[in-house]
Amino acid sequence: MKQEKERYTFNAADFNEKVMKGHFKKIYPVIARQIIERTGITSGCCIDLGGGPGMLAVELAKASTLDVTVCDVTSECVALSEENSREHGVHERVSAVQGAAEKLPFEDNSIDLVVSRGSIFFWEDQQQGLSEVYRVLGPGGWAYIGGGFGTASLLQEILAEKADDPKWDVQRKERLAKNPPGHFEAMLLKLGIDGVVERGEAGMWIIFRKSSKLI
Ligand SMILES: C[S@@+](CC[C@H](N)C(=O)[O-])C[C@H]1O[C@@H](n2cnc3c(N)ncnc32)[C@H](O)[C@@H]1O
């Protein structure tokens, strides 16, 4: 049975100004460092899937020599990503394309790292999206997909800043409750992907790597 999804309504320009460049600003460099430390990937091609206006992509590019493509289902995010990468001087290594997780506009076995923060909860078909991520990963390529705020203290800071909007934390917790680690572990199992789902105080991440030998 198809899982009922939360309907995602999104004002990309507002999200860019108030969230990405507002109270979430400090989480992206922290998450970028965590991804690089965990995967060891510092060069090659990376996709920031459902990257929105692209600040995780920008921070990944700043912390590495990766070429990062933001892939987002909305055209507004493509334009905002391009604007943000220019503003941060990384436009030569950060580009953006419109595309859905369920049908990624990338070749098989072509990508070194796929990251995605705060997006999988809204995908129409999460299993198909994960299968697509696996398809495009190159030999030895890594995926780091989920949601989080970097550290527990950054999450606490955001919660304090969001004190006037208690609905935000309620929705965040509902989303986590609807998407527990077991839900994604079962998907990985069905897809035959060897991966882990890590849930900590600051977020939840699905992490896997494609074999370095393609059969
Ligand atoms: C909450 S925003 C997160 C943006 C950004 N990754 C961040 O961490 O701030 C969710 C993003 O996922 C995108 N999105 C939703 N469903 C998608 C899908 N099926 N494929 C690609 N992007 C999707 C939305 O357009 C939006 O930009």
Image: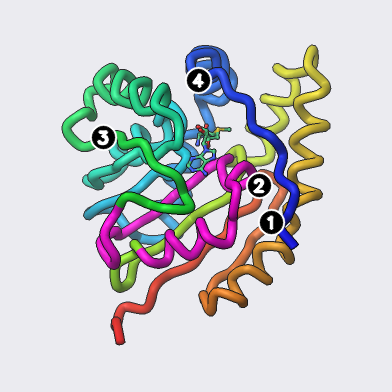
Q: What number is the disc on residue 199? A: 1
| Label 2 beta carbon within 8 A of ligand 1 | no
The answer to whether the residues at label 2 and label 3 have Cβ atoms under 8 Å apart is no
Give the residue type that dot 2 points to.
Gly
Residue 23: image quadrant is top right
Q: Residue at x 44, y 51 (%)?
A: 35
Q: Is 207 colored magenta in this rendering?
A: no
Q: What number is the disc on residue 91? A: none
Q: Residue lying farthest front?
A: 1
Give the residue type that dot 3 points to.
Ser
Give the residue type that dot 4 points to.
Ala
Write down the residue under mark 2. 203
The answer to whether the residues at label 1 and label 3 have Cβ atoms under 8 Å apart is no
Q: What is the x, y in percent for residue 166?
A: 83, 21
Q: Nearer the viewer, mark 4 or mark 1?
A: 4
Write down the residue under mark 4. 12
Q: Residues within 10 Å of mark 4 (few under 14, many from 20)?
A: many
Q: What number is the disc on residue 95? A: 3
Reply above or below: 171 against 190: above
Residue range corresponding to the magenta coloring: 106-135
The answer to whether the residues at label 4 and label 1 have Cβ atoms under 8 Å apart is no
| Label 4 beta carbon within 8 A of ligand 1 | yes
